[in-house]
């Protein structure tokens, strides 16, 4: 019960790393809003987890949708202790000049603009309470980029820099901001990053990870519980690699 009594919003919370974080947060005593574009998946997960979880159909790239999400949190919980910016998209490997403008715009809207939009609502609430934790799910791609994923890499590098800047600005009012940099994980996005899922391509990816395995939602959720909980009360501005040694 390390998060007992705390309330959280987890974007992209219905699958992958987000689902792992939601499950672990509720197991640790938190009440969680599962914000996801896939409303059916969010509702199914909330129904499974019981009264500690609420589903919210949310497009994190849309200002009005994000506003409704925070209004729901206010109505349901009356407070906000934790925000996890987990929602993200990728693109299949290709030369940087081959990505279409529409794909680039969507990448930045979901991976970058969403952090700005959620901050506009979360930060005033946390400033007023003089407490809170924001966790951004970035990527090892922002630290040690893979070729042919240039614009995805850049979006995650932006998130790491935003995390540190947010941490500096909010430290004096008691709000902590950290990031997690997962290595490629067993999530729906894995096939996107690899282009196709074959034993040969998996072997090439795994060869770059010294510990020899992909990350899992449970790995990321364990780090999220720590960074968002009271045990990490003096930790802010960290971008923690959960990567099996890839970025060493």
Image: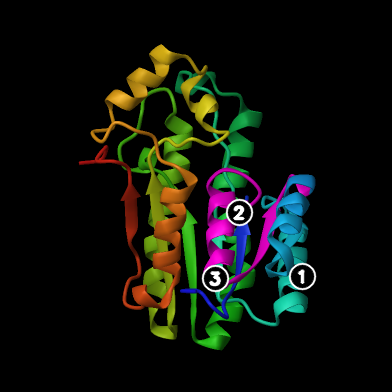
* Magenta segment includes 30: yes
Residue 189 numbered tag: none
Residue 166 visible? The answer is no
Spot occupied by residue 218 in the image (x, y as percentages of width and height) = 46, 50
User: Which residue is labeled 2 in the image?
Assistant: 114
Looking at the image, is mark 1 or mark 2 earlier in the sequence?
A: 1
Q: Can residue 42 be seen from the camera position used here?
A: yes
Relative to 167, is 116 on the left or the right? Answer: right
Q: Which residue is mark 3?
A: 82
Q: Which residue is mark 1?
A: 72
Name the residue furthest bottom: 129
- 170 lies above or below 178: below
Dot 1 crowding, Cα within 10 Å, few <14, some 14–19, many 20+: some
Mark with earlier residue (3, 2): 3
Q: How is the image coloured?
A: rainbow
* Magenta span: 13-39
How much space separates mark 3 and mark 2, taking CA atoms? 16 Å
* Helix, strand or loop at mark 3: strand
Residue 129 sits in which quadrant? Answer: bottom right
Q: Is residue 111 above or below residue 53?
A: above
């Amino acid at each position: 019960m390390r998060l007992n009594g705390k309330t959280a919003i987890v974007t992209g919370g219905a699958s992958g790393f987000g689902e792992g974080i939601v499950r672990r947060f509720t197991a640790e005593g938190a009440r969680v809003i599962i914000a996801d574009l896939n409303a059916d998946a969010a509702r199914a997960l909330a129904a499974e987890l019981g009264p500690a979880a609420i589903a919210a159909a949310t497009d994190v790239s849309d200002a009005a949708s994000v506003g409704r999400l925070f209004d729901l949190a206010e109505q349901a919980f009356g407070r906000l202790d934790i925000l996890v910016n987990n929602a993200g998209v990728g693109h299949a490997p290709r030369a940087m000049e081959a990505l279409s403008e529409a794909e680039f715009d969507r990448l930045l809207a979901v991976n970058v603009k969403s952090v700005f939009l959620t901050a506009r609502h979360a930060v005033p609430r946390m400033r007023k309470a003089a407490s809170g934790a924001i966790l951004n799910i970035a990527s090892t791609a922002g630290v040690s980029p893979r070729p042919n994923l240039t614009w995805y890499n850049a979006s995650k590098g932006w998130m790491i820099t935003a995390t540190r800047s947010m941490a500096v600005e909010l430290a004096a009012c008691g709000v902590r901001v950290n990031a997690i940099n997962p290595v490629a994980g067993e999530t729906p996005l894995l096939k996107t990053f690899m282009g196709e899922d074959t034993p040969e391509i998996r072997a090439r990816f795994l060869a770059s990870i010294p510990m020899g395995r992909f990350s899992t939602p449970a790995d990321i959720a364990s780090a999220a519980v720590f960074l968002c909980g009271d045990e990490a009360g003096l930790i802010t501005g960290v971008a923690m690699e959960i990567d099996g040694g890839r970025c060493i």
